[in-house]
Image: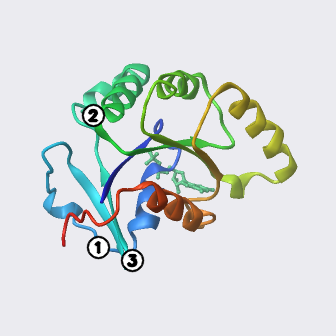
Amino acid sequence: CGYVAVLGRPNVGKSTLMNHILGQKVSITSRKPQTTRHRILGIYTDDDAQILFVDTPGIHKKEARSINRYMNRAASSSMVDVDVIIFVVDGTQWTEDDELVLEKLQQTNCKTILFVNKVDKIQDKEQLLPHLAKITERFEFDAVFPGSALRGDNLEPLISQIKDWLPKGDLFFP
Ligand code: GDP
């Protein structure tokens, strides 16, 4: 199985994304299980894969007072030992906080995915492409998915991409 962290500033849709992915799946969030490395937020399971969605260590609500500091720490601690980072941005609202974290993520060895969320709110989809091009010109990702966590648009390709990258046959719950 693999470890996946979902990062992004508040309100970009991280919980919605997690709920959608974990919705029909085995989710053990209530027992707050720990691995040696992380608190598990939920587990996606299907016939041939398990994906552990984890919290990043050392991050507490209080630190969210300073969004920059919080995001920096989240990015740094994820970079240490997570296999995949999904960085979620709001496709309708790009901010400097996003850019700071993106710079940080350029230094990681793990796979990075940019999930551009809330595209259902974008009326003129043609505007999205130049916008995405500008981001991907400046920052490198292993994959970019525009989508909608709320409607579930483009989440299947996201999951199947993650599954492709994860180590095979190493299950948390055999
Ligand atoms: P978080 O703070 O990053 O976990 O964000 P939430 O998942 O709590 O979402 C913040 C708000 O954005 C909520 O009102 C969601 O319903 C809304 N939201 C999340 N994803 C989408 C999306 O894909 N499209 C639209 N239109 N709204 C969304």
Between 36 and 168, which is closer to the camera in this rendering?
A: 168
**Farthest residue, direction bottom:** 47
Circles 1 and 2: CB atoms closer than 8 Å: no
Residue placed under numbered mark 3 in the picture: 24
Q: Residue at x 47, y 38 (%)?
A: 8
Q: Amino acid at mark 3?
A: Gln
Say whether disc 3 or disc 2 marks the residue closer to the N-terminus. Answer: 3
Q: Residue furthest front?
A: 168
* Residue in the image at 55% along x and 29% along y: 98
Residue density around tag 2, few if under 14, some if 14–19, many if 20 or more, within 10 Å: few
Q: Name the secondary structure under disc 2.
A: helix
- Give the labeled residue for mark 1: 26
- Lateral position of residue 107 relative to residue 89, left or right: left
- Amino acid bearing label 2: Lys
On screen, residue 170 above or below 104: below
Give me the C-alpha separation between circle 1 and circle 3: 7 Å
Q: Residue at horizontal 19%, vertical 69%? A: 173
Percent position (x, y) of residue 137? 73, 29
The mark lying in front, picked from 1 and 2, is 1
Callout 1 secondary element = loop
Q: Few, some or many C-alpha atoms within 10 Å of disc 1 (few <14, some 14-19, many ≥20)?
A: few
